[in-house]
Amino acid sequence: MKDPDLRLIFNLLTGVRWAALATLSEQGPEASHVAFVAEPDFSGVLLHLSGLAAHTRNLGNDPRASLAIGEADCEMGDPQTLARLSLHGRIEKLPRDQAAYGLARKRYLARIPTAEALFGFSDFKLFRLVVERGRLVGGFGRARDFSPQALREAASLPAK
């Protein structure tokens, strides 16, 4: 994958905190918006979700999910030229009694400190989207599929 595409992936995963989460319900696909935090190697994405939300119930029945992350729209020019990233994979719950939970919680709160109070609510759980494949659209007519290896390459880029 070319460096400009890797840079777009890096920028979207480190510069955006709000994305559309697609899950599967008995009625079909459903999308909702969630806050997210990418793991340092971009192999996974952390989500802190309420058990009261439809998307969380859907994930309990079918762990397949997709996360769509987009460049902010400044309402100038053609929105089709905005960069966007779709990550597809499976959601796994991070149990509070495992060592990985503490590190994931710390990482999540470093990026979204306002979520601290939500960690005290019993219905909120920490989840991880394990990325199996992705798709990058770098603008109109510039699209490509990519593997988790490309995410690791993007994660290794220096911050700008």
Image (spheres, helix red, strand yellow):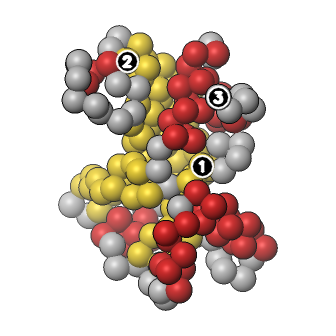
Asked if residue 22 shows in the view, the reply is no
CB within 8 Å, label 2 to label 3:
no
Residue 38: image tag: 1
Question: Alpha carbon of mark 3 to alpha carbon of mark 1: how far?
Answer: 17 Å
Q: CB of mark 3 within 8 Å of CB of mark 1?
A: no
Of residue 94 and residue 108, the one placed in the foreground of this image is: 108
Mark 2 vs 3, N-terminal side:
2
Q: Please state the horizontal and vertical placement of residue 37, each as a whole percent of the image.
A: 56, 54
Q: As shown in the figure, which amino acid type bears the numbered disc 2?
A: Gly
Residue 29 lies, with reference to residue 136, above or below; the image says: below
Numbered badge on residue 160: 3
Which quadrant of the structure image shows residue 84?
A: top left
For disc 2, the neighbor class at 10 Å (few under 14, some 14 to 19, many from 20) is some
- The residue drawn where x is 43% and y is 46% is 67
Disc nearest the viewer among 2 and 3: 3
Amino acid marked by disc 1: Ala
Query: Where in the figure is residue 121, as x and y percent of width and height?
Result: 47, 86
Q: Is residue 31 visible?
A: yes
From mark 2 to mark 3, how far is it between C-alphas?
21 Å
Please, which residue is most extreme toward the right here? 99
Whether residue 104 sits left or right of residue 21 in the image: it is: right
Q: Which mark is residue 139?
A: 2
Which amino acid, mark 3?
Answer: Lys
Q: CA distance from mark 1 to mark 2?
A: 22 Å
Q: Residue at x 27, y 21 (%)?
A: 80
Q: Helix, strand, or loop for circle 3?
A: loop
